[in-house]
C-alpha cells in the first residue's frame, strides 16, 4: 500500500498523459497511412522513435550532472507551466468556452493537406508524408519523455513511470492498428483535465522541494495537492459552465 | 530550417499558451523564492504561497477567460 502511494501517482500521471499524446500522434500517422500507405507512415514513425531514443540517450546522463535542488526547481516550474496550461484548457473546453479537440477533425484536416500536397508535388509526397509522421511521433514523444522524466526525476521512479508511458503507447498503437481509425471516442478532454490536475500537483511539490520546503507528509502531499487542484478545477468549471449557459440564453 | 523552427515553436507551446498564465505562475514561484530567502526559518510559508498562489492564479485566469467571452 505504502509502495503504491509512492509509485502510483507518477505511474498513473505518465500513463494518462501518454495516452493523450499517443492518441494525437496516432491520428497523424493514420492520416499519412490512409493517403500514402503504411510505408512512409511507418518509416516516419520509426524515424521519430529513433530520434527520440537518441535524445533520451544523449540528454538522460546529463540530468545526473545537475544538482538535485536545481533539477527539482526547473522541472517543478516546467510542470506547473505545462500542467496548469492543460488544466486551464481542459476546463475551458469542458465549459464550452473554447471548442473541444476533435481527433476526427484533425484526421480530416491532415488527410486533406496531404491530398492537396499530392496534387501539387506528387514526386516528393512520400517524403513529405513520412516527414509528417516523423514530426508527429517526435513532438508528441517529446511530451511523453518530458512527463516521464518530470514525474519521476530524483525519486527513483523512472522505470515505473516509463512502464506507465510504454503501456499507454502500446495500448493506443494496438487499438489504432486494429481499428484503423483515429480514436475519436477516447475522452481526451477528461484525460487532459485529470493529467493537468496531477501535473500541477507534481509541479507545486517539485518547485517547493527545489526551494527547500519540507512538505508535511512528504510524497503524500502530492495527493493532497491533486485533491485541491481537482476541487479548484471542478469549481471553476462549474462556474464557467453556468456563465456560458447564461451568455447563450 | 522550417522544420527546426516548427519544432522550437511547438516546444515553447508546450509550456506557454496563454502568456498571462505563464507570467503569473512565474511571479508566484519568484514570490515563494523571496519568502524562502527572507524568512528561512518558516519554509512552509513559501510552500503555502506556492500552493495557494498557483490555485489563485488558475481560478483568476479561468474567471478572466470566461468574462472575456
Image (cartoon, rainbow, N blue to C red):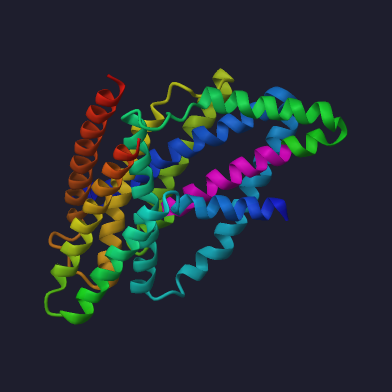
Q: Where's residue A182, x and y in %? A: 54, 24
Q: Residue at x 31, y 57 (%)?
A: A203
Residue B51 figure quarter: bottom left
Establish if B31 lies above or below A157. below
The residue stretch that appears in magenta: A130-148
Of residues A128 and B26, which is closer to you in this image? B26
Q: Where's residue A29, x and y in %? A: 63, 32
Q: Residue at x 68, y 34 (%)?
A: A42
Q: Where's residue A205, x and y in %? A: 25, 59
Residue A153 figure quarter: bottom left
Predominant secondary structure, magenta span = helix
* Left or right of B11, for residue A158: left
Q: Does residue A167 appear anywhere in the picture?
A: no
Asked whether A27 falls inside the magenta stretch, the response is: no
* Left or right of A172, for residue A151: left
Q: Residue furthest right?
A: A123
Classify the position of the C terminus of chain A by image quarter: top left
Number of on-image labels: 0
* Left or right of A133, for residue A248: left
Q: Does residue A241 appear anywhere in the picture?
A: yes
Of residues A36 and B65, which is closer to you in this image? B65
Q: Residue at x 30, y 51 (%)?
A: A200
Residue B69 figure quarter: top left
Q: Where's residue A34, x and y in %? A: 68, 23
Q: Residue at x 22, y 58 (%)?
A: B53
Asked whether A146 falls inside the magenta stretch, the response is: yes
Amino acid at each position: 500500500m505504502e509502495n503504491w502511494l509512492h509509485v502510483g501517482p507518477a505511474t498513473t500521471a505518465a500513463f494518462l498523459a501518454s495516452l493523450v499524446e499517443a492518441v494525437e500522434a496516432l491520428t497523424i500517422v493514420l492520416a499519412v497511412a490512409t493517403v500514402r500507405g503504411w510505408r512512409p507512415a511507418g518509416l516516419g514513425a520509426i524515424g521519430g522513435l529513433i530520434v527520440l531514443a537518441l535524445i533520451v540517450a544523449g540528454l538522460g546522463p546529463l540530468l545526473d550532472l545537475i544538482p538535485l535542488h536545481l533539477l527539482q526547481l526547473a522541472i517543478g516550474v516546467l510542470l506547473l507551466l505545462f500542467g496548469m496550461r492543460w488544466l486551464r484548457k481542459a476546463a475551458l473546453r469542458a465549459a464550452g468556452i473554447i471548442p473541444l479537440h476533435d481527433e476526427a477533425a484533425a484526421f480530416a484536416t491532415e488527410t486533406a493537406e496531404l491530398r492537396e500536397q499530392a496534387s501539387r508535388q506528387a514526386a516528393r509526397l512520400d517524403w513529405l508524408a513520412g516527414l509528417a509522421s516523423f514530426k508527429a511521433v517526435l513532438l508528441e514523444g517529446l511530451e511523453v519523455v518530458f512527463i516521464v522524466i518530470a514525474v519521476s526525476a530524483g525519486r527513483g521512479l523512472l522505470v515505473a513511470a516509463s512502464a506507465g508511458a510504454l503501456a499507454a503507447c502500446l495500448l493506443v498503437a494496438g487499438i489504432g492498428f486494429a481499428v484503423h481509425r483515429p480514436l475519436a471516442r477516447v475522452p481526451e478532454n477528461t484525460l487532459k483535465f485529470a493529467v493537468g490536475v496531477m501535473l500541477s500537483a507534481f509541479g507545486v511539490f517539485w518547485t517547493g522541494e527545489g526551494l527547500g520546503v519540507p512538505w508535511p507528509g512528504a510524497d503524500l502531499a502530492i495527493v493532497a495537492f491533486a485533491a485541491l487542484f481537482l476541487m479548484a478545477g471542478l469549481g471553476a468549471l462549474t462556474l464557467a459552465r453556468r456563465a456560458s449557459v447564461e451568455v447563450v440564453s | 530550417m522550417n522544420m527546426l523552427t516548427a519544432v522550437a515553436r511547438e516546444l515553447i507551446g508546450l509550456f506557454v499558451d496563454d502568456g498571462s498564465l505563464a507570467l503569473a505562475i512565474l511571479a508566484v514561484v519568484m514570490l515563494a523564492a523571496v519568502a524562502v530567502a527572507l524568512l528561512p526559518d518558516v519554509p512552509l510559508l513559501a510552500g503555502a504561497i506556492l500552493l495557494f498562489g498557483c490555485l489563485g492564479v488558475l481560478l483568476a485566469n479561468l474567471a478572466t477567460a470566461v468574462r472575456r467571452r
